[in-house]
Image (cartoon, rainbow, N blue to C red):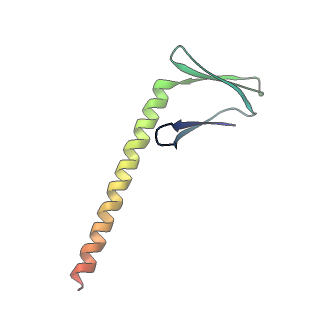
Amino acid sequence: MKIIVWNIESGKSMDILSGHENSITSIQLAFGDLYSGSYDHHIICWDLDTLEERLEEKEMMRQVHIESMQIEVWKRQLKSNAGK
């Protein structure tokens, strides 16, 4: 089962935490970490510092992807305009 991390301002999914094998029954923030319990009889401690680093890395990768797409569109426009 999964925990989906949402950006409440944008309403977009930011990350998915996978680890439980059965339905998640509880989630709690404590001591700077996120804890989840499940019917699989396990409690997982999710390190929020690590999660924040993953989110920052994903955002950086998303920005690089957007920039590369913008460059590709720009190159196509240059080729199209050169052929006219």
Where residue 33 sits, quadrant-wise, is top right
Q: What is the count of numbered marks?
A: 0
The residue that appears at 50% across and 25% down in the rendered structure is 48
User: Compared to 20, does 81 lie above or below?
Assistant: below
User: Compared to 67, does 79 lie above or below?
Assistant: below
Where residue 39 sits, quadrant-wise, is top right
Percent x, y for residue 42? 72, 23
For the C terminus, the image quarter is bottom left
Percent x, y for residue 74? 28, 67
The residue that appears at 24% across and 84% down in the rendered structure is 83
Percent x, y for residue 30? 56, 15
The residue that appears at 70% across and 37% down in the rendered structure is 1
In the picture, measured across the screen, residue 43 lies left or right of residue 11, that is right
In the picture, measured across the screen, residue 31 lies left or right of residue 37, that is left
In the picture, measured across the screen, residue 3 lies left or right of residue 64, that is right
Percent x, y for residue 44? 64, 24
Where residue 68 sits, quadrant-wise, is bottom left
Q: State the residue in front, 1 or 13.
A: 13
User: Compared to 41, does 70 lie above or below?
Assistant: below
